[in-house]
Image: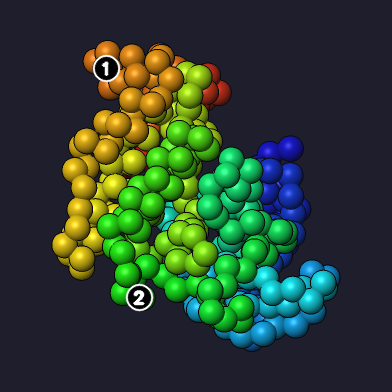
């Protein structure tokens, strides 16, 4: 059947009626317009709708990526509930690489990623809040309370004046080293904003944390290469050092601490770091090379179908 006859009958070249396609398109647009940011009232309603929470006690804080609430679970224990927002700067950046996800789906992915990162770290003995449950864009975890008041969250390092800043600084370095060596993680945002002073020093906000590859020397979808992990570890150390040097006039030698941590890596990873000479290793391609390969494949398919060369879109 010719294309003209298809159009007269109301069908397009994909075999769908034009009316159905318009309805499907309008439905997607309407769904996109209905999505709006999660307000605190809606965050409370989402938590109460779960069977894990019986009461909302108070609001701990509303950050740029999530609303954090103090809640009471079914066992009458205090828990911390983190409701991820839909339209944060991080999620907007992640959405640029996808065409099949809505913001609420990406918020659920962020909550799930933080849950499994916390679980992996907690199982390795890293001082982080214990994750309890994750559902959609909600993460429920252990509540870290203040030493003097069980209903008050533990203060952040930035919000108090430390009695012994030198000891706290080296405790923070020990956490970062254990995170790197025991759990194989890079925090990625390690600073005074993500350290709590409770019965011990505790780190949090690990949705952006990523593991490095310890078996092969390439990037994979869920792990980064070891040399890039060392670069990110150095950045975390520098951020921590900068704050304590500015406020308390205490600091450590970043290069010496970094070297001492790297020297505890397995021998094969140390040898790789010493002998690396190439920027690209077998099995790894830059995104530009992958893009050119896809364009060449599309050009070949168009030429086989039509006998004409495909014009690449203008950059």
Seen at 24% across and 62% down, the residue is 243
- Position of the N terminus by quadrant: top right
The image position of residue 311, as x and y in percent, is 37, 33
Q: Which label was assigned to residue 93?
A: none
Corner quadrant of residue 240: bottom left
Asked if residue 145 lies left or right of residue 244, the reply is: right
Asked if residue 254 lies left or right of residue 202, the reply is: left
Binning the other alpha carbons within 10 Å of mark 1 as few (below 14), some (14 to 19) or many (20 upward) gives few
Q: Does the image show residue 36?
A: no
- Position of the C terminus by quadrant: top left
Q: Answer above or below: position of 71 versus 281.
A: below
Seen at 33% across and 56% down, the residue is 167
- Which residue is identified by label 2? 160
Q: Does the image show residue 51?
A: yes
Q: Secondary structure under badge 2?
A: loop
Asked if residue 246 lies left or right of residue 166, the reply is: left
- Please tell me which residue lies in front, 254 or 232: 254
The image position of residue 156, as x and y in percent, is 41, 70
Seen at 47% across and 18% down, the residue is 216
Q: Give the foreground label among 1 and 2.
A: 2
- Which residue is identified by label 1? 274
- Please tell me which residue lies in front, 102 or 278: 278
Q: Answer above or below: position of 135 versus 94.
A: below
Real-space CA distance between mark 1 and mark 2, rounded to the nearest whole angstrom: 41 Å
Q: Secondary structure under badge 1?
A: helix
User: What coloring was used for the rendering?
Assistant: rainbow
């Amino acid at each position: 059947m010719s294309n003209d006859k298809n159009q007269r009958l109301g069908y397009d070249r994909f075999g769908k009626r034009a009316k159905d396609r318009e309805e499907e398109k309008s439905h997607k647009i309407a769904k996109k317009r209905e999505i709006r940011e999660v307000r605190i009232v809606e965050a409370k309603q989402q938590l109460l709708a779960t069977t894990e929470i019986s009461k909302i006690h108070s609001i701990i804080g509303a950050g740029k990526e999530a609303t954090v609430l103090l809640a009471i679970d079914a066992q009458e224990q205090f828990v911390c509930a983190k409701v991820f927002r839909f339209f944060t700067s991080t999620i907007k950046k992640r959405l640029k690489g996808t065409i099949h996800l809505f913001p609420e789906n990406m918020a659920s992915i962020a909550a799930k990623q933080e849950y499994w990162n916390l679980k992996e770290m907690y199982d390795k003995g890293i001082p982080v809040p214990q994750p309890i449950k994750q559902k959609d864009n909600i993460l429920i975890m252990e509540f870290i309370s203040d030493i003097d008041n069980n209903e008050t969250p533990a203060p952040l390092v930035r919000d108090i004046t430390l009695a012994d800043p030198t000891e706290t600084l080296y405790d923070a370095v020990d956490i970062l080293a254990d995170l790197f060596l025991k759990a194989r993680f890079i925090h990625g945002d390690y600073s005074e904003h993500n350290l709590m002073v409770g019965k011990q020093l505790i780190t949090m906000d690990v949705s952006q944390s990523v593991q490095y590859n310890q078996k092969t020397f390439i990037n994979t979808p869920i792990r980064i290469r070891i040399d890039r992990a060392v670069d990110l570890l150095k950045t975390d150390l520098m951020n921590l050092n900068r704050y304590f040097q500015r406020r308390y006039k205490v600091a450590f030698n970043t290069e010496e601490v970094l070297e001492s941590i790297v020297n505890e890596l397995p021998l094969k990873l140390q040898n790789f770091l010493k002998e690396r000479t190439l920027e690209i290793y077998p099995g790894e391609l830059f995104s530009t090379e992958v893009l050119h390969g896809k364009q060449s494949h599309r050009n070949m398919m168009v030429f086989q179908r039509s006998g004409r060369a495909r014009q690449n879109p203008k950059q």
